[in-house]
Image (cartoon, grey):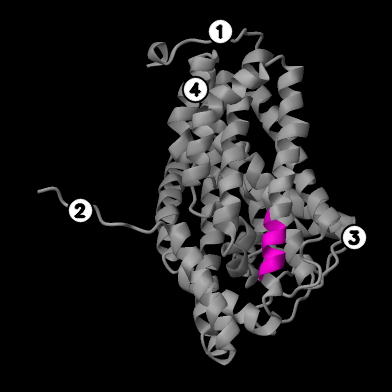
Amino acid sequence: MEKRKCFKLSSSQKILIGMAVGVVIGIFYPAFAVTLEPLSTIFIHLVKTIVVPIIFASLIVGIAGHDDIKAVGRMGLRAIIYFEVVTTVALFLGLWSVNLFKPGVGVSILTAGEPVALAKASSFSELLVHMFPTSFFDSAARGDILQVVVFTLFLSIALIMIGKKKAPIVTFCQSLTEAMFKYTDIVMLFAPIGVGVAIALVISRSGLSVLTHLFGMIGCFFLALVVFVVAVLIPVMFFCRIPIWKFFSAVKEAAIIAFSTTSSEAALPKAMEAMEAFGVPRRIVSFVIPLGYSFNLDGSSLYLPLATVFVAQAVGVDLSIAQQLFISVAIMLASKGVAGVSRGSIVVLAGILPTFGLPLSAVAVLLSVDAIADMGRTTVNVVGNCLASAVIAKWEGLSLEPITIEEVC
């Protein structure tokens, strides 16, 4: 007899169930919701422990661990330039959309009566000085992610300069990164409880309007993604003379996998296979797409500034243009290398928010709708990396000659 397959809920489904339970508790049992607050606080503390180790280790691996960037030379430089230009455009598009629609204005997402104190540095010169740490360990202990990132960038450059002697440190960081991935998976087992309690607390204090604003933020994000594809990716295809409909047809299956699984890793084999079939040489596909997983996260680059400013709006903090620009710089640096992390964008947010004096408790609230946002983020990340391989092939002066899947295999 055949054994029946057990139905297993995904982590996203569990979080959505936790959110639903939290809504019910917040509406009908607000006093009980307050007694559960320690559970949400414990979850936030656990999330906070992830941030510094995983960003430090993943940046070291992502920058100092790429020997093949030097080996490939010109193609590697062109890839990095393209990645940084496109992700910077995505960052500014995220800021534009959240400042235009202001989805966080008029609601509070604080889970407790915690004070919100915006980082004191407000002028450009003060923010610039604040980026540079006096002690790595002090910055790590305070959770100042911007200072941690700056230190790690300098250390990565130093490691590249010492050549083969860097191997023990890079190997240690690779092991630390893998261990932190597993640690993050363990912490995320508690996400349904942390999210449920956080939503219950917010609704007990602010009412159901919180959900309206959260889904308004998601709508704003998906609209910005559409604008990014139409106003950035398609013009890039047109400029590089990449056949638009053929490209979308080629990456369709990889995009569907990314959207349905919210996993860039799950879509990677199909994405590489599709771009080879599209006519991009294997040597370019095998270099550009994996590298893009560290440096070319278009969807994440758009979402993170949008979510950060949404939190600021929701707690009544008016971020200046200079502060928003520095937030973007911090996000651009901190997000490198976290594509493989479960809820990687939430991990980056957990590091960014306290740096600018915004409440860390907002992370649990945002996590309640992160499964929906992650579908769009991951899809655009994958499509963006596929396009990057075609753009670099064109930049190298190659013509795209489609081949069959059988020839790829």
Q: Badge 2 is on which residue?
A: 4
Figure label count: 4
Residue on which the image places disc 3? 123
- Nearer the viewer's eye, disc 2 or disc 4? 2
- x 44%, y 53%: residue: 181
Among numbered discs 1 and 4, the one appearing first in the sequence: 4
Q: In which quadrant of the rendered view does residue 87 lie?
A: top right
What amino acid is found at the position of numbered circle 1 in the picture?
Answer: Glu
| Nearer the camera: disc 3 or disc 4 | 4
Residue 302 x/y as whole percent: 70, 46
Report how far apart the C-alphas of labels 1 and 4 lie in the structure.
13 Å
Q: Give the residue type that dot 2 points to.
A: Arg
Between the residue at mark 1 and the residue at mark 2, the CA separation in whole angstroms equals: 47 Å
Specify whether residue 41 is in view: no
- From this view, report whether residue 43 is shown above or below residue 251: below
Q: Which residue is mark 4?
A: 274
376 shown above or below 108? above
Q: Residue 124 falls in which quadrant of the image?
A: bottom right
Say which label, 3 or 4, has the lower sequence index.
3
- Residue 185 covered by magenta stretch: no
